[in-house]
Image (cartoon, coloured by chain):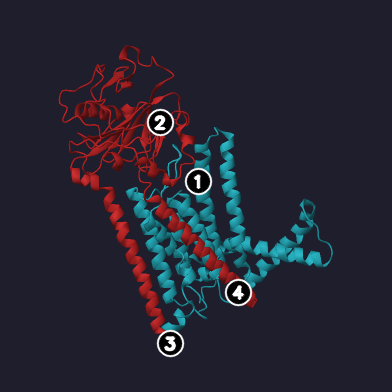
Chain colours: A red, B cyan
Amino acid sequence: MLNVGRVASRLLVAGVVLAALLGPAAAATSAGSACAATAGQPHAALVVDTGSQTVTYCVQLDAPTVNGLHLIELAGQQYGLSYVFGFGGAAVCSLDGVGSGADDCFGSYPDFWGYWHGNGSGGWTWASAGAGSASIGDGGIDGWSWGTGSDGDTHPAPPSLRFSDVCTDSSPSPSPKPKPKPSPTRKASGATGNAAASPTSSATATKSPKGTHTGSAGSSPTGSAAASDGAQSPEIVHASLAAGQAPSSSSSPAGALIALGAAVALGAGGLFAVRRRRGQGPA
Amino acid sequence: MKIHPAAWIGWATCAGLVAFTTTNPFYLGLLVVVAWFVHAMRPAAGPAARSFRVFAIAALVTMALRTALVFLGTVNAANVAYAALEGARLATLLIVFGTFNAVSDPFGVLRLAPRRFHEPALAAALALSIAPRTVAMVEQVREGQRLRGIGGAGWRALPSLAVPVLATGMDEAVTLAESMDARGHGRGRRSRYRPDRWSVGAAVTLAAAVVAAAAFLAAAFSGAGDLHPSTTPLRWPSVEPALVVAVLLLAVPGVVPADVEAARR
């Protein structure tokens, strides 16, 4: 039975699907490294969550990889982030004016600066080693959050952020990028508070841009080691009070709906086939 | 109608890679539906066809166990979600494997092995087909017992079930070995009777599966697509439409028409 026309049409459909897939996939791959490529220099993101506000810094690195403490020093040089190190420069006592002095580094205990590594997709993992032995390279993201809790399950994590949220393509430009504050109250249990957050929550994030960046860079002169000498255009890239807003949730409803629709269609098709086969009896 | 066993191996490998690279429940759930769809559209004859259900049950048990392990340690929403997603990944792998078992003929796969590796491949094929054969046997024995009015349920029926199942299994193994010997397996002499044909459907199946796996690997290396949604803080995972299409490409063997192979001649 020769049925070349039908075969050709099926092959054509398959080819179109392949092309449709390969196009976006290639684009997505290149978009991941676009930030670093345009900047030319290696950059890493630093997120400082004081509990009342979150400030992010797109830090230019002076080496292929730096440790977590040097990343803070670089943020101090480039943006005027104030910081205090203690225990011979091995511990972070104070960031952005929050914390204790070097003489009494953990004086606010049980509140202390928790150290997190970003996992690249917005989430955070509790750092298992000290910042001095961590290694952050181009495209890395480090986070510090003020609070109680001695492990990643109990300490409040910084809001969900990715490197690309902090280092946008235009981030080296001197214009600050204020982000709206969706909710002025920070929940104590950020992890469970977001459990029921639906992907439509991005709609609320755009409606009230009242809370712009409240400049805190350099405003707290407590930094004993704060190096603000060579500060190039001190800029807060963005500040927000949100405890974990999904950064790219705008695309998620579409993808989820496509997935759901496809699953329903496949399920219906499979059920139809099974029904028809049972109707015919054992083939 | 038949898709070449090598194409099925490729399909299962690629689908397994997709499941392995992600813990995003949307991709995993869709992959389970796709696997079920392929299984539903390509019914195989014989005892292997039942293996999908067996593996689906095993997958559910695995996921439940993996989640229950959390309750030995710190319990909070983030931990439970993390364990459940890890369990879902394992479960999806099992279901993909079950689909592969249900749609492909294990002895067709065996015939692909190079002669040098024939004996390990034979052992592997027998091992793969043990679970579905045993399930089929249990059903046969129970049906026989019910007909004789012996039937029973629960743990007490187990001994009266186990002996005939084991005995039948032994008989089947001997029969299988004899029949394979008679067909020249294991003697270096290979039967070329009705060799599997490489069809257009097999090529399309393999190409689509490779593209799907490549898309997920690319996403895994570039960090795109939210393959591992954050659980601390717990948030709604986002879904990349291109990767949804990639998962759907794995459904291609379910829609390859029956007449493609015939049309090729």
1 vs 2, front mark: 1
Mark 1 chain: B
Q: Which residue is under mark 1?
A: B86
Residue holding disc 2: A128
**Callout in the foreground (4, 2):** 4
Residue B171 visible in this rendered orientation of the protein: yes
Q: CA distance from mark 1 to mark 2?
A: 21 Å
Chain-order first, disc 3 or disc 2: 3
- Nearest-to-viewer mark from 3 and 4: 4
Tag 3 subunit: A
State the residue at coordinates (52%, 71%). B108
In the rendered structure, the residue with mark 4 lies on which chain? A
Q: Nearer the viewer, mark 3 or mark 2?
A: 3
Tell me which numbered mark, 3 or 4, is placed earlier along the sequence: 3
Q: Are marks 1 and 2 on the same chain?
A: no
Disc 4: which residue: A277
